[in-house]
Image (cartoon, rainbow, N blue to C red):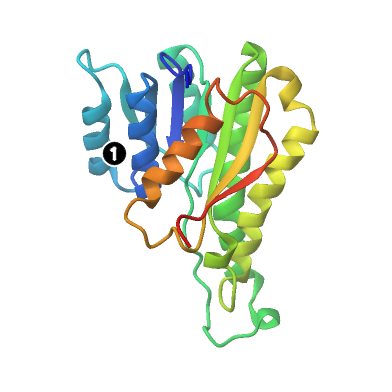
């Protein structure tokens, strides 16, 4: 299957995590140029960039990406566009587990001070980054966006309600953008989540990366607004 990713430019947020690393390597193996956005693990991101940079050193670079900084998505996307002339693919993989105060507290007892950062850190950065990425993709008439999240079964339950809400928002974002007409401009948007049985498998990140490759390639000409679960063997 011809994926048409040779020479495409890809931004992977959360690039130092297991899924982020697997995705970055998969796109690089297809001949894409990959920007690796990281939050804290600069050394790991730069090491991966060196691995993927290619003979001339120009096929990968690491760039900081702060979930809590509302301006960060804009200048991260701008850095990719300035270096490579545009951004073709966004893999929005950055997230973090929310800190829930009081393990025994009921849902209604959790203060806004505790739950708002969980929702903000796991939904708002993705929305901002997609906004910045889609603007250029529309102008160029082609783009692919994949929103990566854990399976609801991994984030739901007592103590993780608000994290689950944020991740469900990503699935809604994919559908809303598709219904809003991004496909008419050549931009397809989907969500991908790791299924509960795949989460403990050593091959799970690579399995997810293969799904991301297809969804974010020229081989995908019609799938948009969907949430795909990579569940592994059951």
User: Residue 213's x, y, as percent?
Assistant: 47, 31
User: Residue 126's x, y, as percent?
Assistant: 58, 43
Residue drawn at (23%, 42%) of the image: 43
Residue drawn at (63%, 26%) of the image: 134
Q: Residue furthest right?
A: 180
Q: Nearer the viewer, residue 161 or 192?
A: 192
In the image: residue 152, left or right of residue 83 = right
Q: Which residue is labeled 1 in the image?
A: 45
Residue drawn at (65%, 13%) of the image: 141
Q: Nearer the viewer, residue 184 or 61?
A: 184
User: Residue 223's x, y, as percent?
Assistant: 66, 32
Instruction: Bin the neighbour count of mark 1 within 10 Å (Cα to Cα): few under 14, some 14-19, many 20 and up.
Output: many
Q: How many marks?
A: 1
Q: Nearer the viewer, residue 46 or 177?
A: 177
Kind of element beneath mark 1: helix
Q: Vertically, is 164 above or below 77?
A: below
Residue drawn at (51%, 55%) of the image: 231
Examine the image and state in which quarter residue 226 appears. Answer: top right
Q: Vertically, is 218 above or below 119?
A: above
Q: Residue furthest bottom?
A: 104
Examine the image and state in which quarter residue 114 appears. Answer: bottom right
User: Is residue 115 visible to us here?
Assistant: yes
Q: Vertically, is 44 above or below 198?
A: above
Examine the image and state in which quarter residue 44 appears. Answer: top left
User: Is residue 72 visible to us here?
Assistant: no
């Amino acid at each position: 299957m011809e994926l048409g990713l040779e020479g495409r430019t890809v931004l992977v947020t959360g690039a130092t995590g297991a899924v982020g690393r697997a995705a970055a390597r998969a796109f690089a193996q297809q001949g894409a140029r990959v920007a690796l956005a990281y939050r804290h693990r600069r050394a790991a991101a730069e090491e991966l960039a060196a691995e993927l940079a290619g003979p001339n050193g120009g096929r990968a670079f690491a760039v900081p990406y702060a979930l809590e900084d509302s301006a960060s998505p804009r200048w991260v996307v701008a850095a990719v566009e300035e270096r490579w002339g545009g951004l073709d693919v966004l893999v929005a993989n950055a997230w973090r587990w929310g800190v829930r105060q009081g393990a025994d507290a009921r849902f209604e007892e959790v203060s806004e001070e505790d739950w708002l950062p969980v929702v903000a850190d796991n939904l708002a950065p993705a929305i901002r980054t997609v906004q910045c990425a889609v603007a250029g993709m529309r102008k160029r008439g082609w783009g692919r966006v994949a929103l990566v999240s854990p399976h609801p079964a991994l984030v739901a339950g007592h103590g993780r309600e608000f994290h689950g809400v944020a991740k469900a928002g990503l699935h809604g974002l994919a559908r809303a953008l598709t219904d809003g007409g991004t496909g008419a401009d050549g931009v397809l948007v989907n969500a991908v989540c790791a299924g509960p049985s795949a989460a403990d498998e050593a091959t799970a990140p690579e399995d997810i990366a293969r799904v991301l490759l297809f969804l974010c390639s020229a081989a995908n000409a019609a799938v948009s607004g969907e949430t795909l679960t990579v569940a592994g063997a059951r």
